């Protein structure tokens, strides 16, 4: 990215405005952000799903523990 002088006007132009316009038009990294969002959504779904499954897993282990004689 070229260096932009942001502290003064050059030839009547507004370099800060051009910097922000170019920044908004730049799409580099958009794919990485999209993949990150997809991974976050999948992670949230897995956490929610595993929370529901955990009670069933606990029941299975409790059944195994109860099968052994106590004492």
Image (cartoon, grey):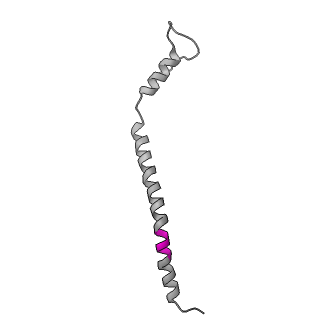
Residue 27 on image: x %, y %:
40, 31
Q: Residue furthest right?
A: 71
Instruction: Work out whether residue 22 or residue 67 is closer to the camera in this orientation and state it.
Output: 67
**Spot occupied by residue 5 in the image (x, y as percentages of width and height):** 54, 16
Q: Which residues are magenta?
A: 53-58
Q: Nearer the viewer, residue 27 or 58?
A: 58
Q: Does the magenta-highlighted stretch encompass residue 54?
A: yes
- Image quarter in which the C terminus is found: bottom right
Seen at 47% across and 55% down, the residue is 44
Answer left or right for 28 relative to 8.
Answer: left
Q: Residue at x 44, y 23 (%)?
A: 22
In terms of depth relative to the viewer, which is nearer, 48 or 21? 48
Residue at the image point whose x is 43% and y is 41% from the top:
33
Judged left or right of residue 16, residue 38 is: left
- Answer above or below: position of 64 versus 9: below
Residue drawn at (46%, 73%) of the image:
56
Q: Main secondary structure of the magenta part?
A: helix
Q: Residue furthest top?
A: 11
- Is 3 in the magenta? no
Residue 66 in picture, x, y percent from top left = 52, 86
Which residue is nearer to you in this view: 34 or 53? 53
- Numbered disc total: 0
């Amino acid at each position: 990215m070229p260096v932009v002088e942001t502290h003064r006007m050059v030839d009547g132009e507004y370099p800060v405005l051009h910097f922000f316009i170019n920044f908004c038009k730049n799409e580099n990294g958009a794919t990485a952000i999209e993949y990150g969002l997809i991974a976050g959504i999948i992670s949230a779904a897995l956490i929610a799903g595993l929370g529901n499954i955990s009670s069933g897993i606990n029941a299975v282990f409790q059944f195994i523990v109860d099968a052994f004689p106590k004492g």
